[in-house]
Image (cartoon, grey):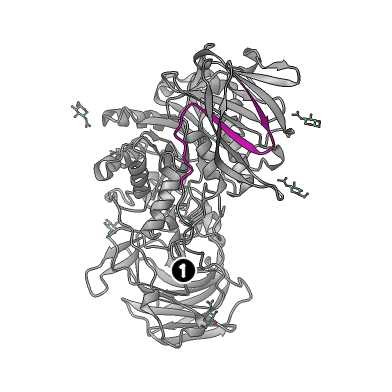
Amino acid sequence: MMLTLSLIAFIAVVSGRTITYPIDDSVGLERRFDGIGGLSGGGATSKLLVNYPKKQRDEILDYLFKPNFGASLQILKVEIGGDSQSTDGTEASHMHEPWDENYQRGYEWWVMTEAKKRNPNIKLYGLPWAWPGWIGDGSPISPYKNVSMAASYIVKWILGAKQYHNLAIDYVGIWNERPYNIPYILMLRKMLDFHNLTSVRIVASDSGWAISDDILRDSQLASAVDIIGVHYPGTTTIASAMKTGKQLWSSEDYSTFNDNVGAGCWARILNQNYVNGFMTSTLSWNLIASYYNALPFAGDGLMTAIEPWSGFYSVRSPIWITAHTTQFTQIGWMYLRHGAGVGKLESGGSYVSLVSPDSKDLTIIIETMSHDHSVCIRPALPPYTVNATTIEIQLKGSFAKVKELYLWYSKLGFNGTQTSLFEQRKPVAVTNGLFKLSMGLDEVYTFTTLNVGQKGSYPSPPVSKPFPDYYFDDFNTYRSNMEPSNFAQQLGVYEVVDVGDAHRGVMRQTMQHHPVAWCKAENLNVTINVIGNHKWSDIYVEAEMRLGPVNASDGVFLAARIDQGGCYTFKTKGIFFFIYPNKQIYVLANDLAQTQTIIKGNIPQVQKGWNKVSLLIEMGKVTGSINGQQIFKVDVPKKPKNGFVGLGTDSWGIADFDNFLIKNASSHQANNFNRNNILRFVPKHG
Ligand SMILES: *[C@@H]1O[C@H](CO)[C@@H](O)[C@H](O)[C@H]1NC(C)=O
Ligand SMILES: *[C@@H]1O[C@H](CO)[C@@H](O)[C@H](O)[C@H]1NC(C)=O
Ligand SMILES: *[C@@H]1O[C@H](CO)[C@@H](O)[C@H](O)[C@H]1NC(C)=O
Ligand SMILES: *[C@@H]1O[C@H](CO)[C@@H](O)[C@H](O)[C@H]1NC(C)=O
Ligand SMILES: *[C@@H]1O[C@H](CO)[C@@H](O)[C@H](O)[C@H]1NC(C)=O
Ligand SMILES: *[C@@H]1O[C@H](CO)[C@@H](O)[C@H](O)[C@H]1NC(C)=O
Ligand SMILES: *[C@@H]1O[C@H](CO)[C@@H](O)[C@H](O)[C@H]1NC(C)=O
């Protein structure tokens, strides 16, 4: 399995007890470095970032994207929204229907624009997780029934990025962690070329290595695919992938809580994806953990920002681990050869060396992460120990005459040992190309000829606060098609629509058909949008709602104690108050699927148009009202004990929601709602 390494003589030399590692470009260079990046989406992972106060939001974006400041990312990958649940929510498609086209939805355009503003050289990469139903052409499980339809849909997204946001997309993928289809890939290449998008490179297939064998067999496919991108490769590759001669990427990796354990794993894969697997780009899932903690994979981002209402955010250690590589390299730099600047340390750990295309600059990154916390390497590497050691580094070739190297250092502390993150240390003196280095465990060192590093910082953000227990949104201050702030849609797609009458802006559920889904979340054919504090148990929530004027859903609901989101949303439990205005009935259910009905009955007082619906959970009772009239007051079901509040539709189809209000249960009677507590920040896009 470990190919090529055996072809290259291991040149480390033992002198006394100190091992000498040569760093030498005179023996030739190896692969082109393609950059380190993060993934916004897959899905809805940047949701809560969007409506942060501008000051904190700009700071966060600087930590992620600003060159020589923080993570200084070199690639940004985003989800091409597909109207379907894709892990932490749904992201809107630019074409809900074949006749619909809109390039203002969601926030990925905005994330890309902010990244480019800070780093015009950042590369952009788009990938669909799911597809709107019409792409399935009758199939709810495959987008490939009509490959020209699917390819044209993706090409429109790329053209729209340019036309509406002046964003040039560099890379496009196939279908996230789902089967690829060769006729589709060939059609995509053909259509890209037809639209003069020859510079857009295809990455395939954002899954396992299987496509390598097809590339070897099929020369047309080989010329269509530029990069083999795999997910969670465990740092290793396979022989047929090497044989294709393609650049190899870990196009999704990491997915680990962003404490020091996660950071240690990130440090290891950033080096070892190249050392063991010749992969020249590694992308973190995800870019930033900006989704409610009660949703799946809490904290699996390079940093965390989940409180737009307070402005609090947390710069986590993976940001600084990233900086060790990104602040001292550029896309297009070259890796030195295995054994001449790239390899494993005898005492455990690894090193990589990269040189600028003009051979003037050199960066060496060494990590000594101990393997007992290799949580993010899937499948896990065989365990091995890492020991403190002293090594010698011998610069040769273009760098033989270097007199000193700048040094940046991190140590990840565990069980009480101290953490240091991205500290600049005194430059090391190099004598006759040689210097010595004594290393401990869980450390990262960057030695570089570049004097450009900076540990960017801002004053501490405002203190952390829970979601406010007074909250109101009339949806009147958004631009059309924006996704309302703080609402985390789990099924369906909600956007602000100006309905023109006294209601003006309303939040509309727009999806009319089952998507070509990414997981089973949509199986119930209902939609749900959650908000608030998952710890809430007693709470008051109210909204005006109506079935859509055309293509309406069958029913609408208001809910509390919603226990979960993500791909298991179809199993969600909570307290759901469904109303069916056409049938004049209601159902109070203990689950979204309505398998456990608490009470149901007739509601002759329900209007055909707007109804004000409320749900109060207080002191063991749940009370539901329509237009101020109490419909039921029953015992609160035993489970769940707490959860989000939210709303949604029964069946696909249009429904409108307005004047959404949350109040603390114990104060809802007092009518002391204070408008100063309205927390809503409307992001300025573009
Ligand atoms: C595929 O979709 C296109 C529209 O994008 C249509 O013109 C074409 O007829 C369809 N092909 C088939 C085989 O249905
Ligand atoms: C592609 O570029 C050529 C040459 O500039 C131009 O004639 C053609 O119309 C372009 N095609 C499209 C689809 O934009
Ligand atoms: C680390 O030290 C232990 C104890 O001396 C030894 O058994 C082990 O082989 C060493 N590991 C490496 C990679 O040097
Ligand atoms: C921390 O200490 C505990 C208890 O001794 C041990 O099980 C664990 O592996 C240690 N963690 C790390 C990361 O060293
Ligand atoms: C949901 O819709 C899909 C596609 O129309 C259908 O196959 C499925 O049976 C529906 N599921 C339920 C629970 O109605
Ligand atoms: C309603 O559905 C019909 C049939 O799919 C479609 O032609 C029409 O455009 C839809 N109207 C709206 C407002 O979505
Ligand atoms: C609701 O308000 C009461 C009275 O102001 C307060 O004691 C309680 O902590 C509040 N509950 C929540 C969940 O904030």
Q: Magenta segment: does it hold 629?
A: no
Say which of 149 and 478 sits in front.
Answer: 478
Secondary element under disc 1, as helix, strand or loop, is strand
Residue 582 vs residue 438: left or right? left
Residue at (55% x, 41% y) in the render: 422
How far across and down, in percent of the image, does residue 28 sit?
A: 51, 13
- Figure check: 492 above or below 3: below
Residue at (40% x, 42% y) in the render: 66
- Figure check: 4 above or below 590: above
Residue at (72% x, 50% y) in the render: 415
Residue at (34% x, 64% y) in the render: 508
How far across and down, in percent of the image, does residue 516 sit?
A: 43, 48
Q: What residue did someone put label 1 on?
A: 646
How far across and down, in percent of the image, does residue 489 sit?
A: 44, 60
The amino acid on which the numbered mark 1 sits, given as a three-letter code, is: Gly
The range drawn in magenta is 435-456
- Figure check: 103 above or below 660: above
- Indicate the quadrant where residue 152 lies: top left
For the N terminus, the quadrant is top right
How far across and down, in percent of the image, does residue 25 sit?
A: 52, 15
Q: How many discs mark residues in the rendered view?
A: 1
Q: Is residue 129 visible?
A: no
